[in-house]
Image (spheres, helix red, strand yellow):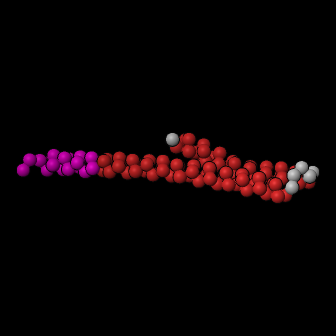
Amino acid sequence: MDDNKIKQQVARWDLYAKIAPKIFLIVSAFSLIFGVTSFDTMFNIGMIIFAFTAVTWWFWTIITVKYIIITMSSATTNLNEVKQDLKNIRKVLEEEQNGPN
């Protein structure tokens, strides 16, 4: 998983969050108005879709947070290594500047 992939996934979840409820409401309204199905059936379908979405989003969130934690941990380790390298360079430069004693 990389940053661009996560951005694309977030964009898809955002689009889904904006479009899915509207489509469901429109389909439900037409189904109820034209007597295709009952309110109870549409309610149950809505609950199933909601549950599926919530579970899928939850697992995606956990996987993404895990990736972010691993990335941040790796970045922290690398920054600590760079910090130590800079300390060593500074020490060498100070020793060279002071000259042999």
Coordinates of residue 54 in the picture (x, y in percent): 64, 54
Residue 32 figure quarter: bottom right
Q: How many marks?
A: 0
Q: Is residue 98 covered in magenta?
A: yes
Choose between 42 and 66: the one closer to the eye.
Answer: 42
* Majority SS type along the magenta span: helix
What is the residue that sits farthest to the right in this orientation? 34
Camera-side residue: 85 or 37?
37
Q: Is residue 96 visible?
A: yes
Residue at 55% x, 41% y: name it: 4
- Indicate the position of residue 19 as horizontal and vertical percent values: 74, 49
Q: Residue at x 72, y 53 (%)?
A: 48
Where is residue 8 drawn, in percent x and y? Answer: 60, 43
Question: Which of the pair 91/49 is nearer the observer?
Answer: 49
**In front of the other: 15 or 94:** 15
Q: What residue occupies the far left of the structure in this picture?
A: 101
Q: Is residue 33 left or right of residue 70?
A: right
Compared across the picture, whether 85 is left or right of 26 comes to left
Examine the rendering and report whether any part of residue 18 can be seen.
Answer: no
**Magenta range:** 84-101
What residue lies at 25% left-to-right and 51% top-to-bottom? Answer: 87
Q: Is 51 situated left or right of 85 in this image?
A: right
Q: Residue shown at 48%/50% (left/top)?
A: 66
Was residue 8 drawn as part of the magenta stretch in this picture?
no
